[in-house]
Image (cartoon, helix red, strand yellow):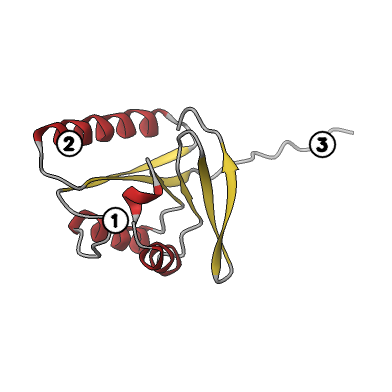
Amino acid sequence: MLKPVQNKISKKKRVCAYARVSTDSRKQGEFLENQISSYERSLKANPEYEFIGVFADQGISGFSRNRLEFQRMVQTTKDVQIDLIITKSISQFARNTVVLLETVRSCSLSSLLLPRKKAGMYRRTGNGLSVRSLNVGNI
């Protein structure tokens, strides 16, 4: 007897990236532009991702909650229900643990990925975060 074939449609993860440099220097600006371009290329090329965008702040400390693009990303995450935020390092996302935890909780974010050496996958679990080690070479 033949079994019916079921089409398995996998839902793409809604993904954005966040980048930040703390100074307005030309060198830091070039670094930020290169990082933005790299995120755009790699995220758009991944067939498992629905690319939402790259949010980037320049000349603003990671301690500050008043980062225009960071706040826009948080609001977009709430509006669009982003599944994954990719950032170079946890310090780019937030240098303050309270800001990190509040942001992840307020967005109901499923995960925050740091795709670099000695990186971790930060997954929202209940009322806190757990860390699972990763060594990811590519996004």
* Image quadrant assignment for residue 4: top right
* Image quadrant assignment for residue 128: bottom right
CB atoms of marks 2 and 1 within 8 Å: no
> Where is 105 relative to 112, above or below?
below
Nearer the camera: disc 2 or disc 3: 2
* In-front residue for pair 37/19: 19
Type of the residue with mark 2: Gln
Badge 3 density bin: few <14, some 14–19, many ≥20, Cα 10 Å: few
Badge 1 density bin: few <14, some 14–19, many ≥20, Cα 10 Å: many
Q: Position of residue 2 (x, y in %)?
A: 84, 33
Q: Is residue 99 left or right of residue 71?
A: right
Type of the residue with mark 1: Met
Task: Decide which of tag 2 and tag 3 comes sooner along the chain.
Answer: 3
**Residue position marked by numbered label 1 in the rendering:** 73
Q: CA distance from mark 2 to mark 3?
A: 59 Å
Q: Is residue 113 left or right of residue 23?
A: right
SS for dot 3 = loop
CB atoms of marks 2 and 3 within 8 Å: no
**Residue position marked by numbered label 3 in the rendering:** 3
Nearer the camera: disc 2 or disc 1: 2
The N terminus appears in which quarter of the rendering? top right
Return the mark for residue 28. Answer: 2
Residue at 15% in and 45% down: 23
Q: Position of residue 87 (x, y in %)?
A: 37, 44
Q: Is residue 109 left or right of residue 24?
A: right
Q: CA distance from mark 3 to mark 1?
A: 46 Å
Type of the residue with mark 3: Lys
Q: CA distance from mark 2 to mark 1?
A: 21 Å
Q: From this viewpoint, which residue is outermost toward the bottom?
A: 127
Task: Decide which of tag 2 and tag 1 comes sooner along the chain.
Answer: 2
